[in-house]
Each structure stands twice: as C-alpha cells, then as structure tokens.
Image: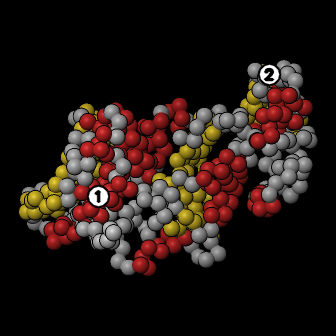
Amino acid sequence: MTRIQQLDAHVVNRIAAGEVIERPASVVKELLENSVDALATRIEVDIVNGGMDLIRISDNGEGIHPDDILLAVTSHATSKIRSDADLDHVSTLGFRGEALASIASVAKFRIRTRPEECPVGRELDSHGGQIVINRDCGCPAGTVMEVHNLFFNTPARRRFLKKATTEFGHIAEHFSRIALANPRLHLVLRHNEKLVYELPAAAEPLERIRRFFGSEVADQLIAVSSEADLPTGGKIRVWGYVGSPSLSRSTRKDQFLFLNGRWIQDRSLQHALAEAYRGLLMIGRHPVSFLFLELPPALVDVNVHPTKSEVRFQDSQLLYRQLLKTLRDKFLTLEFRANIEVPGSGRPVSGRSNELRFDRPATTVQPQKELDLWASHATVSSPPRIGEFARSSSNDRAVFTNPDVIAALAVEPHQRRGALESAPDPPEPADFSDPASGRAS
C-alpha cells in the first residue's frame, strides 16, 4: 500500500512552475510585471535564441533589500501583500510570491540588485533551485535578472518548445501588452543582440499603438471616454481607442483590454464590444480596440487564474453596461459610414452609420435578462424599428431604404446569414449619393 507523504519544497516548486512558467514568454511576463511593480521608469529586455538560452531584464526600480534576496526565490514570499485582507484590494500586477521561485527551479537564475539607499548590491545564483552564490557585488541601483538555459533540468518540457522565432513572437506579444498599458515606461527589446524596439516614455498609449500597429491603424481609431460614480463609492472609468467600422479583423486578436493596468481576457466585455458594433460591421468581422478600464481593486478578484489573465468582477453587469453605453454614445455622435455586404450580391450597400438604431426588433424573442440589459441602455425613448425609414438630421433624407438590407438587419446575427442568402440581389445603391460631394458613396 502506497503511503501519503509531504513533498519537499523543491518538488513543490517544480510542480508550481508547470502552471506559472509555460514557455520563455511566461518568464518575460513575470519579470516585466515585477519591474513595473518596482516603479521602474526604464526596462531593458535582452533575449537570446527565443529566450531558451538567455532572458535578461534590467530595470532602474526600487531593487531588493540585501537581507531579502534569499526570500525572493522562496515560494510564497512577497513584498506586495501582508495578510488575507490584502487579497481583497490587490493593486499590483504580482502578489502571490510564486514567480521567482518557479523560475529558479527550472533554470539557471541570477539576480543582481541594489536599492538606491544601499552602498553595495547583492548577487544570487540559483541552479535548478539550489543556491550556489550569495554575495555582495557592485551594480547600479535597480535589478538585473538573468534566466539561462530554461528547462535545462526538465528536458521533456524543453522539447515541447517551438523554434526560436515562434518563442520570440510570444515574448514580443507580452512585451507589447506591457508597453501599451504603461506608456510612462522607457522600454527596450533586443533579440540576439539586435534592437527590435526602443520605446521612449510617451504621454498617451496612442503613440505606442502607432509604433506597434502603424499609422494605418492609429489614424482610424476613435477616442472614447466615460466616468460614472459607483453606488458603493469610488468611480468606474472607461477610456481608450476603438476602430472605425472601416477597420476590422477576421479574429479578435487586436482587441486589447486592460483593467487597472493589467491585460485581461473577458468574454463578457468582448460581447459588450461586439454589441456596440452591431449593424456596423459585416458578419464575421471584429472591431479593433484598445480599452482601459479603471475601478476600485476591491471590486475585482484577480486571484482566479494561474497567469492572472482572467479576473472575476463583483458586478460584471456594471462594467458591461458602462462599456456598452460609452461606445454607443460615442457612435451616435459620429458621421462615419457603414458598409453592409449582402452575401450573394457581391456589392456593399452604404449609409450613414449614425442612422443605425441600437434597439432590437420587437419580433425577435430574446432571454429576459438580455432584454432587460438592452432596455437599460436605450438612448432614445421610442426609436423607430430598423425596418422603418429613419430621417437624417443633417440632410433630412431617407436612408437604409433598400428592403433587402432592412430585412437583413431585422434579424439577429445567428439568423442573419440565412435571411441574407435567400435575399435577391439589390439594385445599385444610386440613392446613397453624398450631397456634400455630389458623388455616389
């Protein structure tokens, strides 16, 4: 009979590393977050062979006190929380005290650090979790962390890594998220001693967006912002940039959500984004977004996922409503044009996007919860249904009068494709001429 026994700390760290450290990009993410939490203003990232041979991250942050350097690579040792109560209002990117211990257990790990107030620095080397060097050293204020030969003691894990270019692609993705969330930072990224990015501190994320995604994307972004008081005190703020309807993607990869400076994934908020663009994008297209959400840390539980990429909101509908209202209120003030392609026709039908009404047709049956949510965002008391003629306040003419387009818009997305496929080819949209230019759209 096999007896139960307590695992030693080294084995525990190796197991924990499997959840926290999946690949070189995971190491870069954890170390970058440590540098941000240390209030660094400059961070340099050096990568060799996709991070499999070397990851070096240097910052000018607060550093680690020499007396604490051994604790830094001890599991569940952290400077960011002190008690169970602190978990209810986490304001830092890291807080569990697992990352450095996990990295040290599966790599050759070196830390050189010096706080500004200390005359000398401290150096620590760990090979697979075993401390081999712990001594004073000379170094500038801040911290340098080097990770050599990742997974050298777990060859099975190393064999599952992809080629260097693929692994570096994942690293660059995490680097870009930190850069977008923290424009105040001066960031440098090098791969195999070649400069990839040097990003001086910027006043606004838009400058970073332009650098990563180019002017073609940045010039088609719409600035949005809103703020609301919370019943429990404090405020909720939504701001950032979203793409015009002419800027869309076939996937959601270019949808960036940041909550209190942390990149997150949240299906509910992605749904709110999709709802805001209902009727503005063709079927199968997704908007581009760079949205920053701010709310009191006490209303968010970030301790629900090993990589902290998913969070749990105390009131998810509150944030959903605020995001949806922010985008719709903005869209109703704009004059961009929407193109809705009728499948089978090969031709788009154009019209002013601010003529699209954000109410659902009365003939569509929806779950009561979703209907109540939709009703709470109505921006007009009695808007006409999508099947009725709408009048433009700018030129007082009917728009979206094509019956096939009206029929297509009057059904839900999951019904829309069948309705469109059965619709006959519409006539040429000559009635959508632009009165300002005298030319057809």
Q: Is residue 268 visible from the viewing direction of this image?
A: yes
Rendering quarter of residue 5 = bottom left
Amino acid type for the residue under numbered disc 1: Arg
Residue at 31% across / 51% down in the picture? 27
- Answer few, some or many: residues within 10 Å of disc 1's Cα (few below 14, many 20 plus, some between 14 and 19): many
Q: Does residue 320 appear to the left or right of 263 in the view shown?
A: right
Q: Residue at x 36, y 67 (%)?
A: 96
Q: Are marks 1 and 2 in contact (CB under 8 Å)?
A: no
Q: Is residue 39 visible?
A: no
> Which of labels 1 and 2 is toward the front?
1
Q: Is residue 58 above or below residue 13?
A: above
Q: Quadrant of residue 420?
A: top right
- What's the image's color scheme? secondary structure
Residue 262 place in picture, x, y as percent: 46, 57
Which residue matches tag 1?
A: 14
Q: Residue 88: x percent and y percent? A: 47, 74
Residue lying farthest to the front in this orientation: 1
N-term-proximal mark, 1 vs 2: 1
Q: Residues within 10 Å of mark 2 (few under 14, many from 20)?
A: some
Give residue 180's position: percent from left, percent from top.
44, 48
Counting from the top left corner in percent of width and height, residue 55 is at 25, 45
**Label of residue 355 in the image:** none
Give the residue type that dot 2 points to.
Ser
- Say which residue appears at 63% left-offset and 55% top-offset: 268
Q: Quadrant of the C terminus?
A: top right
Question: Which residue lies at the image location 42% right of the left edge and 76% below the top edge?
Answer: 86
Disc 1 from disc 2: Cα separation: 58 Å
Residue annotated with mark 2: 345
Q: In the picture provided, is 205 more to the left or to the right than 8? A: right
